[in-house]
Image (cartoon, grey):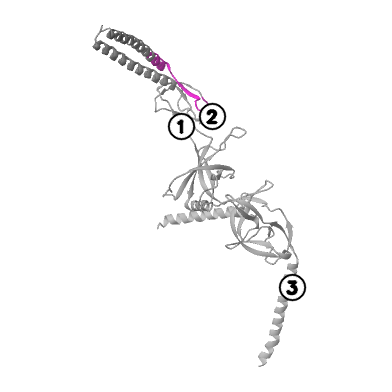
Amino acid sequence: MTLKRSLVPILTLVLIANLSCVQRREERNAQQQDVAVPARVVETITRKITEYAELPGRSAAAESVEVRAQVSGYLESINFAAGSFVHKGDPLFTLDSRVYRAVLAQRQSDVDAKRADLNRLEAELKRQQGLIEKSATSMQQLELAQAGRDERAAELEAAIANVERAKIDLDYTTIESPIDGEVSRERITVGNLVTVGSTLLTHIVAVDPIHVFFDVDERALLLYRERVAKENGASKGSLVVKFAIGDGEFDHEATVDFAEPKMNETTGTLEFRAVAENKPNEVGVRNLIPGLRLRVLFPTSPEYDAVLVPEEAIITDQNVKRVYVLGENNIVESRAVTLGPLQNDNMRVVATGLKLGERVVLDNLLRIRPNTVVEPIPVPSESTTRIVREDGVIINRDGTVEYDGLYEWSLERDANKKGAASEAAGKNPA
């Protein structure tokens, strides 16, 4: 009984101390809430966008021709500069034509001889026809004259055809460009024997327009077909895709003109072909050449009005994406959002969770918590940076460049993990 009485004052003192701590903490929180945290604030905006799937692609020449001779002969001259642009019909090579000129002259003389003989036989036929009317010759003589005239006429036609063939062979001694395009280097030098059909002289590729090939995976293809179905079964106008050269920007466009009629069962993809203009720039250089690695943006949604915020405003809370939204009296509310694709200017599409015109906190995010009072600093509704996520480079709007070391470290860590996993799989095959 004495022990219980002695503990009562002690417990009373502990309870009073705890209540005092709680009271002081609440007073400190209230004071902190009364102090507004300065932060830049942007309003959400809307923009018409189309969602895309990024796919690997490649460029290819619309036309490509291997130039070979159609007659044999010794190469006499080369009439182009390697790498130059040539037009259809431009002379590229000249073969020694003396033999072909002699053959043409011989066959022309054969035509002249047969034409003269035909004239003689026609005169004989007319003479026999006159004699038969006077009964001064027999029908057998008339028939022989008729047959001789017809035979010589047929021989004359054959001789004329031989002359035409000789002219063609002579023309073939000048080898012309079959298409407009850029010509490669010569594959044979002057003085060498060119064999008909087998000797490769050079090759020409058409460079404008140029083809863009890309393979669409099954998921992107189904999204595209769903999009077309929403547009009442027909795409509005031609299908235009954007593409980038290598790791560059998506500042090129091509119009799809063909798709394979069936899926590739091995890769699970469908090949598309698009046509892109490839005009030379002010210094005469074309951006595209056949065989380039491309990245193609294939549209998987119709154009719609999307709500966007700068990427810097997005907070990652474990697997949940959030933003801090200013409510009444500039009190912060934590809002879960569903994100859409990132745009080229580092603005992020917000599929759900935000409306047009709502105010979103852009910085000072480490000092802000739900119910924090913010002193808003309105700024334009645009991202202050553009992040190239392939290598973690950050390009500021003033042109300065920074490097996201944490992002680079995460890339190296992921690569090391994949390498270790591959090595382990090799040592312990299933």
Q: Quadrant of residue 159?
A: top left
* Residue at figure coordinates x 68%, y 90% from the top left: 5
Q: Secondary structure at mark 3?
A: helix
| Mark toward the start of the polypeptide (3 vs 1) | 3
Between marks 3 and 2 in the image, the one whose residue lies nearer the viewer: 2
| Mark toward the start of the polypeptide (3 vs 2) | 3
Amino acid, disc 3? Glu
Q: Is residue 228 visible?
A: yes
* Residue at figure coordinates x 28%, y 12% from the top left: 145
* Spatial separation of the CA atoms under disc 1 and disc 2: 14 Å
Query: Magenta stretch containing residue 83, yes or no?
Result: yes
Query: Horizontally, is 91 left or right of 30 in the view?
Result: left
Q: Secondary structure at mark 2?
A: strand
* Spatial separation of the CA atoms under disc 3 and disc 1: 84 Å
Query: Horizontally, is 388 left or right of 24 in the view?
Result: left
221 or 205, nearer to the observer: 221
Query: Magenta stretch containing residue 204, yes or no?
Result: no
28 or 216, nearer to the observer: 216
The mark found on residue 85 in the picture is: 2
19 or 272, nearer to the observer: 272
Read off the magenta span: 80-106
Q: In this picture, is 145 found above or below 334? A: above
Amino acid, disc 2? Phe
Amino acid, disc 1? Val
Q: In this picture, is 290 found above or below 47? A: above
Q: In this picture, is 345 found above or below 95? A: below
